[in-house]
Structures are given as C-alpha cells and as structure tokens.
C-alpha cells in the first residue's frame, strides 16, 4: 500500500466521531450548501473538527456517511473543493493539501502540487482534503525574483541550493539535487529545464528551507518570511540554451545572477548568457564560484577576465570584496555589475549574497492591469487545468474572471480562477512578480499552450501575427536577409518567425528595423516588449516598435 493510499485508509478507519477531526462528505454544491443557514452551520462544523484536531481537520470527499466509497465525477469533486475552500475561509482556515484516488483504488497518487495521477477508472473520485487553521497567505510582502545563468557545471544550481538551505555542498553537487526535477537530470548531474527555489528573510535574518524536496517545507518559508527571494534557476548546457532564454526573458525578473567557475573561467556560453541578461536591461550580479578549488592567484585571474568581459559590453564591474555590500546595493544598475567570490563547499561569499538579496530593492514593479504569460500547464485531478507563470502586472484573486489566449484562431476564451498557489502555498491573491500556479475553470489543460496570456475579462486584446522591431545582431556567420527564420523568444513565447529587414539585410553588429511575422500562430505582442532571437549560433536582441493586429 502506498503512503498516499494509507492516508485514505487511516481516515476511513478512524471514521466520524463527535470528538474527532475527520468528516465524511459525499459532495458539496454551491446552490445547496452555501444557501441560507447551511453555510454558517457547515463552517461551524468545520471549526469543531479543527478544534478537535489541534488546528487540523481531515475531510474525506466522495464517501457516504458510514464511509462507503461512493465516488463523484471530476466536475463534482472540483465544485466540492470550491465550496470547502469557502467554508474553510469562513472558519479562518485554508485547504493545505488535496489527494485523490479512483474509488477502486487503482489510481494512487497525487496531491495538488501539479502531479497528474493516472486517469480515473471511470467509477468516480475519492479525495482527502487536509484543512489547517489560519487564513490563506497574504502576499503584500516584497518578493524579489532572481534569474540565474551560466555555463554547465559552473555551479548555478549548487549555489542556489546552498543559499536556500544554508547547507554546504559535499563537493558532489548534493545541494544541486534540490533543484533538479527530472530523473535524467539527477542521473546526469545536469539541469534540463527551469527550476524554481525560494527562501526569505525576517527580522532575525534568513528563513531557509529545511528540505526543498518537501513542498510543505517550501510553503512554510512563504508563510513565515517577511521578504521572499525566488530563483528561476536556468540551464547551462548548450543544447538547452532555448530553455535558458525562456527563463531569462519569460519571467518577471528583478535581478540576474551570472555564475563563472574559478576553475574554468568565462566561456562562450558565459558570454551568450551575459548578452541575454544585459540585453533585457536586467541589473546583474556575477558570482565567481568554486573558489575553494583553485589558488587565490587563479581566482584573481578569473575576476580580471570577468571585468574585461563586462567592460567589452560597456558595463562597470564592482568588486564587492573591495568596495563593500553598501556600494553594491547603492550602485547596482543596468551599467554597474557587482562581482562576489563564492564557494558552496566552504560557504565563503554566501553571507554576502544573503545580505545583498535581503537589501536589494524590488525593481520589477508594474501596477497596471493583471497580465500573466503562461510558462507551463498541467492538470490536477479534482482541480482541473492549471496555468503557471510569473505575474507580469497587476494582481489576480481567486474567483476572478479572465481571458485566456490567443487560441490558434486568434480568439480569447473566458475562464475563471479556481485557486492560486505560490511555492506550494495557497494564496488568496498574487501580485506582479509572483511565480504562481492558477487553477482555471472553463478550459481543458490540452487547450493551454506556453506563450498564451491571462488578462482581465474586460480587456480588449488584439492578437498579433506580425510586428515591427528594432533589432541588433549579436552573432551571425554571414548576413540576415529577407525571409530569415530564427526562433523569437518574447515573454514565454518561443516561436519560429520570418524576418524582413528594412534594407534587405543586416550584418553582425548591425542595428536596424525589421518586420517580424510569426510562422504558425498569433500571440499577444505589445509595443516596447524586448525579445531575443536565435538560430543555430546566430543570436540577436530586439525591441517591438509597432504591432499589426490580426484582421
């Protein structure tokens, strides 16, 4: 019997008792259980269960009053969770976790952390909801989002793992394992997708994650810290440069953190990642990693190489060891790049990074209407379709009615926000800069694609297939001519597009105007947005100057 299945069996064995914290419900519906005095009565029942369980109650859904496995269809289960969430809010509590099974027990699995369990056997769902005392998290705190970049094996994931846990690495990448989310990444010691990590600060200093592999531990940091720092830990291996660009361009980042290993020094990938960071005008910190592995002379040599590299792109390096943290906080900008020496094994330099991330101001403020480009989507049994990404502007609340799109035909679809999660902690709303998962009602997960955008229902968006841009060619073997087709990375969009330069061609190092037309489908593109384009070893950056809405 799996651990998850054991949770259900224990709840059924304990049963409903007057002095217990377990409650059986076959189903809950809005038009029956929230009308008249039923809402107050059920909220009082929930408070009683919470008091009996010292602040924790267990609700088993899809069972009869005597514990028989009745099962309910997924839509009914979703509505039941919506109603239960409202009852919990009434009782000053929140749903902390939901796990589901098919009633015949063949579909062991999955909590609401985004894991998709096997399909139901067709007999309905049974679920266990854990409800805890205390309202959902308010997110008015400052939340700084940092994008990491750098060559493979230069220690990005290891450095971030040591920062968020406060634990030294063992020399074999143990702390990196907290971020590698796919089995083949763990086996190979390489990151193949974007990883997300979080830690924070309160009046006593850093609030770290005890075990990042446990979602409850990560959620505790979000709940306890006064200030949060989230890391979008990108990939450094050349075949996955596209994913790195998506991480740096498609997120609402406040700062960049570029790592350079002291035993290797700057590489071509280092230069490419630096180019992407600086092309998006992102204030950036350079961390020299693995300083324990080389002599002081070698560390000094690599630091001078980094300084030369920065000056080549008209940036001013600032050594924190020489000028101090105060100067770094005051001077960091699009032109000034602080440099810090670090080692995840000896923990040298990590206190400096802690102080920086505790004191650096949030830069990615945007108080306009809500907007979120979709980075990932997945389906959770009993919850439905979930779209995740970074809130680019405004704020979103549970219950909001939104538009999702554009669809391949250019239309936008109406959806409703069921619930919002941030680093596995349910929140009642999310503001600009938050990395969240939004459960959506009114759309199937299969219809959600990366690059789509969520907007307020009263927005009047125009899908765009073609736009004008000013571009700069960073690298190209010959020239960019009429019909050149790179992949354009704009927000979370990654789509092949045809270039039509104003004067017929662009040479390496040139800056010029071009028409850009997406090859396959429309997106929401707006004037002023920055993008990166890439095809093989050819790379460049651009800014949208005008858009042509679809007819």
Image (cartoon, rainbow, N blue to C red):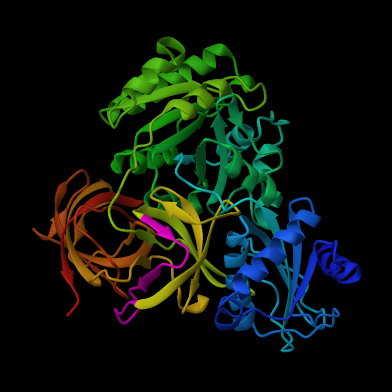
Location of residue 395 in the rendering, given as x and y in whole percent from the top left corner: 38, 55
Magenta extent: 395-412
Residue 284, by quadrant, is: top left
Q: Is residue 463 above or below residue 292?
A: below
Q: Is 506 placed left or right of 427 in the picture?
A: left
Q: Position of residue 544 (x, y in %)?
A: 20, 56
Residue 251 in the image: state x and y as whole percent: 41, 51
**Residue 178 colored magenta?**
no
Q: Is residue 496 above or below residue 266?
A: below
Is 323 left, or right, of 178 in this rendering?
Answer: left
Q: Quadrant of the N terminus?
A: bottom right
Residue 476 in sight: no
The answer to whether residue 153 shows anywhere in this view is yes
Q: Is 358 left or right of 515, judged from the image as shown?
A: right
Q: Is residue 123 left or right of residue 253?
A: right
Residue at 49% in and 49% down: 238
Q: State the residue at coordinates (30%, 44%).
A: 280
In the rendered image, the vertical position of residue 267 relative to residue 30, given as above or below: above
Identity of the residue furthest to the bottom in this view: 122
């Amino acid at each position: 019997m799996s651990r998850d299945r054991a949770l259900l069996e224990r709840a059924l064995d304990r049963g409903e008792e007057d002095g217990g914290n377990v409650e059986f419900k076959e189903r809950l519906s809005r038009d029956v259980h929230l009308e008249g005095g039923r809402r107050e009565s059920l909220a009082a029942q929930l408070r009683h269960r919470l008091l009996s369980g010292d602040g924790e109650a267990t609700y088993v859904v899809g069972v009869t009053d005597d514990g028989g496995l009745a099962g309910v269809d997924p839509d009914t289960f979703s509505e039941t969770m919506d109603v239960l969430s409202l009852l919990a809010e009434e009782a000053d509590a929140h749903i902390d976790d939901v796990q589901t099974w098919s009633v015949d027990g063949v579909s062991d699995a999955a909590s609401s952390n985004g894991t998709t369990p096997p399909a139901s056997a067709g007999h309905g769902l049974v679920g266990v909801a854990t409800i805890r005392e205390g309202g959902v998290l308010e997110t008015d705190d400052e939340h700084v989002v940092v994008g990491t970049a750098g060559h493979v094996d230069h220690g990005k994931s290891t450095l971030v793992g040591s920062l968020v846990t406060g634990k030294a690495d063992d020399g074999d990448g143990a702390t990196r394992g907290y971020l590698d989310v796919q089995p083949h990444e763990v086996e190979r010691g390489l990151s193949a997708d974007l990883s997300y990590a979080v830690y924070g600060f309160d009046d006593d200093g850093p609030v770290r994650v005890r075990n990042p592999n446990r979602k409850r531990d990560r959620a505790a940091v979000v709940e306890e810290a006064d200030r949060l720092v989230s890391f979008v830990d990108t990939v450094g291996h050349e075949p996955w440069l596209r994913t790195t660009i998506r991480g740096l361009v498609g997120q609402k980042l406040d700062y960049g953190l570029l790592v350079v290993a002291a035993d290797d020094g700057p590489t071509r990938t280092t230069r490419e990642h630096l180019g992407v960071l600086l092309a998006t005008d992102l204030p950036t910190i350079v961390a020299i990693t693995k300083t324990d592995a080389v002599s002081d002379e070698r560390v000094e040599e690599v630091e001078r190489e980094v300084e030369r590299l920065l000056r080549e792109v008209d940036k001013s390096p600032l050594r924190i060891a020489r000028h101090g943290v105060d100067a770094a906080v005051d001077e960091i900008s699009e032109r000034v790049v602080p440099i810090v020496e670090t080692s995840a094994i000896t923990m040298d330099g990590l206190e400096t990074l802690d102080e920086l991330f505790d004191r650096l101001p949030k830069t990615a403020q945007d108080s306009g209407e809500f907007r979120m480009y979709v980075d990932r989507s997945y389906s959770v049994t009993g919850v439905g379709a979930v779209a995740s990404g970074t809130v680019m502007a405004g704020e979103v609340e549970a219950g909001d009615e939104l538009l999702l799109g554009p669809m391949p035909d250019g239309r936008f679809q109406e959806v409703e926000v069921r619930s919002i999660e941030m680093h596995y902690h349910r929140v009642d709303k999310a503001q600009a800069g938050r990395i969240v998962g939004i459960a959506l009602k009114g759309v199937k997960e299969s219809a959600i694609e990366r690059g789509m955008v969520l907007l307020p229902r009263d927005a009047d968006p125009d899908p765009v297939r073609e736009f004008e841009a000013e571009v700069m060619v960073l690298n190209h073997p010959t020239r960019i001519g009429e019909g050149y087709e790179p992949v354009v990375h704009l927000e979370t969009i990654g789509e092949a597009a045809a270039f039509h330069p104003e004067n017929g061609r662009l040479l390496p190092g040139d800056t010029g105007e071009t028409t850009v037309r997406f090859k396959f489908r429309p997106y929401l593109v707006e004037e002023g947005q920055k993008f990166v384009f890439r095809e093989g070893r050819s790379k460049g950056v651009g800014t949208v100057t005008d858009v042509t809405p679809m007819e």
